Amino acid sequence: GENVGLHLPTLSVQEGDNSIINCAYSNSASDYFIWYKQESGKGPQFIIDIRSNMDKRQGQRVTVLLNKTVKHLSLQIAATQPGDSAVYFCAENIGSSASKIIFGSGTRLSIRP
Amino acid sequence: NAGVMQNPRHLVRRRGQEARLRCSPMKGHSHVYWYRQLPEEGLKFMVYLQKENIIDESGMPKERFSAEFPKEGPSILRIQQVVRGDSAAYFCASSLQLAGHQETQYFGPGTRLLVL
């Protein structure tokens, strides 16, 4: 399943399928981007980050893609599992000092068995 | 290898009382950040502190809110004369923050403040 932008706050995906969560950012000066996962009642958990001099970065089962031309960021989760159910936030940072992270409004990912 | 610690996890206060939220950063981290989260919303930056210094407080309300990170002990977010609108989850994060580098911020479990 694919979520287009942050207009759809909930994404429902079949277990085992790939998930794609999209995020648009507004500040062209942003140079560091992070994806966080937040489960109910918990704090945000770092998933993966990417700097503006890259367009792709891979982790374990996750890939982040950055398109600076259209100011778009996406998180791909391979073989989605029930434990992936959470709210996912993209976040951006401006400048060389990570003094302030700007969070997006989030996308809730739910997994269908 | 303990992560960021926050306490209390839940705090109930009546209007007009004071709330004190504590945050112990990860071992070796000397930079602390506080964020506020309302239900179904993203986190909003409040303040960034290093030991004994406030670096950026652009997200802090001008009145009733203060933060400190003393040389010894945890960082404290203090809310005086709480109002119902202060009810939220307050998260602390910490980082290594090497000069000129962007370091990942690691979050604590949060304190859920309820003002009656």
Image (spheres, coloured by chain):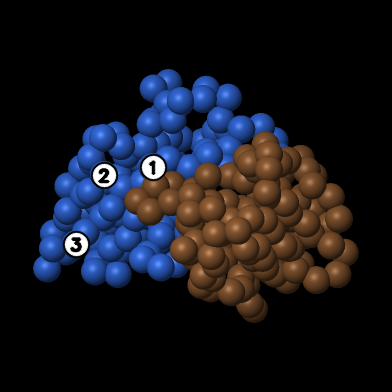
Chain colours: A blue, B brown
Q: Earlier in the sequence, mark 1 or mark 2?
A: 2
**Relative to residue B65, is residue A104 drawn left or right?**
left
Q: Secondary structure at mark 1?
A: loop
Chain letter belonging to callout 3: A
| Residue A5 image point, x, y percent | 29, 34
| Residue A54 image point, x, y percent | 51, 36
**Residue that mark 3 sits on:** A111
Q: Which is in the foreground here, disc 3 or disc 2?
A: 2
Q: Nearer the viewer, residue A112 or B66?
A: B66
Disc 1 residue crowd, few under 14, some 14–19, many 20+, Cα 10 Å: some
The label number, if any, that marks residue A9 in the structure image = 2
The label number, if any, that marks residue B29 in the structure image = none
Direction bottom: furthest residue: B1
Distance of label 1 from label 2 (alpha carbons): 8 Å
Do tag 1 and tag 2 residues touch (Cβ < 8 Å)?
A: yes
Q: Secondary structure at mark 2?
A: loop
Q: Residue at x 48, y 50 (%)?
A: B85
| Residue B36 image point, x, y percent | 53, 51
| Labels 1 and 3 share a subunit | yes
Quadrant containing the N terminus of chain B is: bottom right
Disc 3 residue crowd, few under 14, some 14–19, many 20+, Cα 10 Å: some
Q: Residue at x 58, y 74 (%)?
A: B8
Q: Nearer the viewer, residue A72 or B82?
A: B82
**Residue that mark 1 sits on:** A105
